[in-house]
Image: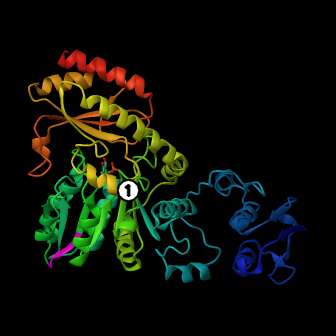
Amino acid sequence: MWLCKFALASDSFPGGEARFLRVQCEIKIAAPCGHADTIALPQSFGAARSTVANEELRSHFFLTAGLTMAKDISTKLIHDNYVPPAGYKAVPPGVFKGSTVLFPNAATVRERVKAFGLRDGYSYGLYGTPTTYTLEQRLCALEGARHCLLGPSGQAAIALVNLGLLSVGDELLLPSNVYGPALRHARTTLPPLGITHQCYDPMDPADLERKLTSRTKLVWMEAPGSITMEFPDLRKLIAIAKNKGAVVALDNTWGAGIAFKPFELGVDISVHALTKYPSGGADVLMGSVTTNDDALHDRLRIAYLDLGMGVGANDVELVLRGLPTMEARYHLHDATARDLASWLAAQPAILKVLHPALEGSPGHEHWATHCSLAAGLFSVLVDDAYTSSHVDSFCDQLGLFGIGLSWGGPMSLVMPYDLPSIRDGAGRYAGHLVRFSIGLESADDLREDLARALRGSFGG
Ligand SMILES: Cc1ncc(COP(=O)(O)O)c(C=O)c1O
């Protein structure tokens, strides 16, 4: 006889698994299910003893029992008898993978089908795993929110909000300095669905007020705006939009849940490109949508299911790994970026530095009343006495700055932009715009690199 002892709380082991075992393995149950039941297995199942210590190990147990029936290596390799070490606990959470979620018996899956896609249990890998739920919970804690959905990129999270909340006849408002692909989405994907958009000047609350109509269902905000870094009077904009009954969604990628708290300001939805500071490694693409509003979450959750949004466990693991160090990294990004931005402001070739924490930057006064910190992102306007070839040469001569998109990673990045081609109206400035994402390198090394490239390309 092979004895298998269960030490499970009776409410966590209501008998379903025991029925499954009986069917699969013809186990004779020696005692009714309950706390610390003993189940006797036939000798043919092997000499091994298995102790199922807690609920997490139940599934491993029934797979182990199944293994004893398998003869072929092909089956044995699938029905692995791995059991995690009992009593094991470590700092990082476990990483759980799976497209298929296994159910202990048919009755349980029949019951669960009624709740597929609800986030109170497990149904299918796409609908959540312990690993994705762990990240969602941590992001809720970061944001002070109740609900979170994870998407495959920040852009996917933005699109999810639009597609989940808008329908034919609706209009959305975007700040004129909105993240470029968000504007493209409003210009390309949404119009055929009967959804229109307008851009408002985020630095002019009256402009937002003028553009809000009964058709405006969603107002996006970004603080600061992409590329040109204007920090709006968020409190005022939120109050205006909510007063007209619109849902307010904020792209909170820059603030990262650290520089300011959007839900305390009254936003309904906060979106992150977790690709940036939460990951911190420049190695993963992911986005999140958090909210405290149950009804909004429900609408977003349905669109989420319909669009087949999901994230892989390996990527979630990377973000979970990045989160504990995010605040410390954010402080360092901020300190180095402010140091270099102030230094660049004094360089002859630079017309202006666009960094919300620097006096004279557009919206600095709003940054000062909303924020305690700033991200490591800023732009400069190079005197248009120089040509774009000079600017390209400056970027090329930088040794410690990678040339490329994105931000929030360990390596500093530089990116030249052709501002007139990406911006209408508000947020257009004279000069050549170059954006920097300051990484975690030494400020002295970066300054030296910048000084050398400035001399090499602009002289002086
Ligand atoms: C402000 C902002 N929001 C959203 C995104 C989109 O994030 P992702 O690259 O993960 O799609 C970006 C990317 O650069 C961004 O800068």
- The percent position of residue 33, horizontal first and vertical second, equals 80, 82
Q: Residue shown at 67%/58% (left/top)?
A: 79
Residue at the far right in the pictured view: 1
Q: Residue shown at 34%/28% (left/top)?
A: 401
Along the line of sight, which residue is nearer the eye, 12 or 443? 443
Along the line of sight, which residue is nearer the eye, 132 or 50? 132
- The percent position of residue 322, horizontal first and vertical second, equals 51, 47
- The percent position of residue 297, horizontal first and vertical second, equals 39, 74
The residue that mark 1 highlights is 272
Q: Quadrant of residue 411?
A: top left
Q: Which residues are magenta?
A: 214-218
Along the line of sight, which residue is nearer the eye, 153 or 332? 332
Chief secondary structure of the magenta portion: strand
66, above or below 244, in the image: above
- Residue type at mark 1 is His
**Colour logic:** rainbow
Q: In the rendered image, which quarter contains the N terminus?
A: bottom right
- The percent position of residue 289, horizontal first and vertical second, equals 38, 63
Q: Quadrant of residue 34?
A: bottom right
**Residue 126 forms part of the magenta stretch:** no
Q: Residue shown at 34%/54% (left/top)?
A: 154
Q: In the rendered image, which quarter contains the C terminus?
A: top left
Is residue 129 visible to the viewer in this orientation of the structure? yes
182, above or below 359, in the image: below
In the visual, does 93 lie left or right of 147?
right
Is residue 280 visible to the viewer in this orientation of the structure? no
**Residue 215 forms part of the magenta stretch:** yes
